[in-house]
Image (cartoon, rainbow, N blue to C red):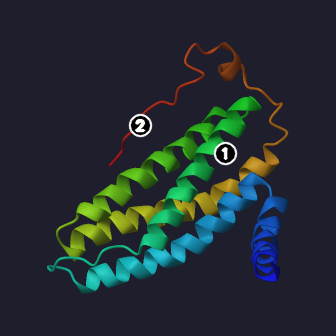
């Protein structure tokens, strides 16, 4: 009986500090942590440039998937508070980009191809670290813009590709 209680106490202790953070803080912290791991995986992939790349660690893939969910939740939170459309779209895009690049990394046939996908993930995670704090300042998200209020497409994000 003591063993299950000890396991529960340890698990609760690990979860409770994260619960104290705001969602933007969680996204920023997780992005910073994951960026280091993605960079390490990218370096390993580059070392196998023309060879078949190593499979990404399941723990890293799972953590990136959880990051994508948190970014989606943050996008929804911004939307529910009628926050800035650009921030909502940025975090929705991060969730989608995480999925796209994870798939690209998993089907890559060379280390070079995998490193490109991981480089894109790393860049996106760096952006998340820099942008997530802006959401905290935007929790005065009551500053609704006229564009958000009047736009028929307020629920959609524009697609802009410049690469």
* Point 51% across, 50% down: residue: 94
Left or right position of 50 against 116: left
Q: Position of residue 87 (x, y in %)?
A: 63, 41
Q: Earlier in the sequence, mark 1 or mark 2?
A: 1
Name the residue beneath numbered marker 2.
Answer: 160
Determine the secondary structure under disc 1.
Answer: helix
* Point 61% across, 15% down: residue: 151
Q: Is residue 52 above or below residue 100?
A: below
Left or right position of 146 against 33: right
Q: Position of residue 125 (x, y in %)?
A: 53, 63
Q: Position of residue 98 (x, y in %)?
A: 45, 55
| Distance between the alpha carbons at the discs numbered 1 and 2 | 21 Å
Q: Is residue 120 above or below residue 139?
A: below
* Point 32% across, 49% down: residue: 163
Left or right position of 139 against 90: right
* Point 37% across, 68% down: residue: 118
Q: Is residue 130 above or below residue 157?
A: below
Name the residue beneath numbered marker 1.
Answer: 74
Q: Position of residue 100 (x, y in %)?
A: 36, 51
131 or 7: which is nearer to us?
7
């Amino acid at each position: 009986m003591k063993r299950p209680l000890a396991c529960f106490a340890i698990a609760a202790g690990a979860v409770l500090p994260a619960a104290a953070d705001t969602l933007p803080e969680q996204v920023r912290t997780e992005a910073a942590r994951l960026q280091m791991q993605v960079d390490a995986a990218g370096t390993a992939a580059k070392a196998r440039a023309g060879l078949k790349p190593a499979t990404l660690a399941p723990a890293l893939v799972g953590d990136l998937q959880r990051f994508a969910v948190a970014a989606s939740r943050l996008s929804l939170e911004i939307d529910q508070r009628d926050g800035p459309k650009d921030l909502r779209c940025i975090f929705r895009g991060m969730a989608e980009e995480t999925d796209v690049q994870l798939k690209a990394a998993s089907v890559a046939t060379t280390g070079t191809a995998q490193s490109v996908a991981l480089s894109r993930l790393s860049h996106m995670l760096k952006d998340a670290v820099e942008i997530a704090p802006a959401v905290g300042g935007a929790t005065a998200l009551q500053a609704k813009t006229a564009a958000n209020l009047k736009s028929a497409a307020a629920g959609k994000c524009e697609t802009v590709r410049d690469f």
